[in-house]
Amino acid sequence: MFIFQWLNNQLLKMEWLSKLIKLLVENVFGLSVQERIGGSIHFFIYDVIKIFILLSVLIFIISYIQSFFPPERTKKILGRFNGVSGNVLGALLGTVTPFCSCSSIPLFIGFTSAGLPLGVTFSFLISSPLVDLASVLLLASIFNWKISIAYVVVGLLLAVIGGTIISKLHLEEYVEPFVYGNKSADVEEEELTVKDRIAFGKEQVQSIIKKVWLYILIGVGIGAAIHNWIPESVISTILGQDKWYSVLIATFVGVPMYADIFGALPIAEALVAKGVGLGTALSFMMGVTALSLPSMIMLKQVVKPRLLWTFFGLVTIGIIIIGYTFNAFGYMFI
């Protein structure tokens, strides 16, 4: 147990890095990390470096695994399952695709055009930006393993339940006709060598880092500002655990933003440090990743309003329920 705790602190939380950045801030910059400016600089440099290191390693590992599940093979696997089992598999496969919501939509189109059940593809669409293997370790590095695992479980449940309800509602007619007409030819799968898979992993790291680096910097910057410059009393007045509306505000504030979980995590970290309820912080994070306005605009191009609003409503209600549940029982995870 002691060894596990030490590895967790050094490899995930990177306490060694925090100490190095503290020495840099105090001995080189001549600032105290207990003061606002020094604390902000420490928070920013430490979180940026930690997230980029973890993200690069994790994306490479996930991409190596993902290389065994190209779209054609994924379609074939999903096509063998129906009902709830198909929704469960769709949600689980979403965890090995480290995409933001906008990047998941082209795969959603491909799966739907291939004739996969609509509910299964929506389970994938909900799960993919919300829960991935990288988020498990990043959440553990910022909070703890209990919170990380609980987040993944509720995220998968939301994906499965949301996809199942959409399936039961029989909303296939509300998908734009061109999606069904965009049939993809079955392409023979090319067997990749270990070298090919390593190359694919490196390419994915470069591609995803290029897409998310700005959002990470913005997210960490906002987190540093919240952590060091906004008084706890102000945060508590708006998002305090005693405010019944805090989860609602956090969920809908995240909608206009466009970021993935990696950019939202530092903000959630700072909010919790200021006394905001765990459920409120997670609702914000889930709202940003699963309900961002740009992804809704993209999805509107391939589904009709009734299906779009059904999806938005189901995910929103699910996030709000998750938020209030974590606020009520958050003490169990601290």
Image (spheres, helix red, strand yellow):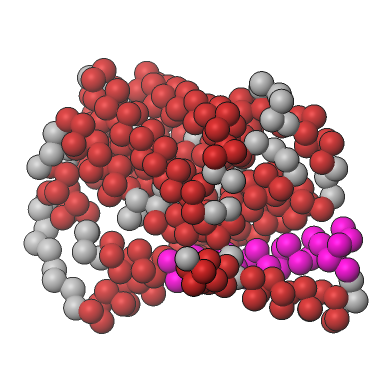
Magenta residues (range)? 32-58
As drawn, 177 above or below 267: above
Among the 4 quarters of the image, the one containing residue 165: top left
Answer with left or right where residue 235 lies relative to residue 12.
Answer: right
Magenta part, dominant SS = helix
Between 116 and 276, the one lying in front of the other is: 276
Answer with left or right where residue 23 lies relative to residue 325.
Answer: right
Among the 4 quarters of the image, the one containing residue 328: top right
Q: Residue at x 46, y 62 (%)?
A: 208
Q: Is residue 90 visible?
A: yes
Q: Is residue 251 magenta?
A: no
Image coords of residue 327 (percent x, y): 59, 32
As drawn, 4 above or below 106: below
Among the 4 quarters of the image, the one containing residue 171: top left
As drawn, 3 above or below 324: below
Answer with left or right where residue 101 lies relative to residue 262.
Answer: left
Image coords of residue 47 (percent x, y): 65, 63
Q: Is residue 52 visible?
A: no
Q: Residue at x 54, y 40 (%)?
A: 332
How many numbered markers are drawn? 0
Answer with left or right where residue 22 lies relative to residue 163.
Answer: right
Q: Residue at x 36, y 35 (%)?
A: 157
Q: Is residue 37 magenta?
A: yes
Report the residue that reaches farthest toward the front. Answer: 1
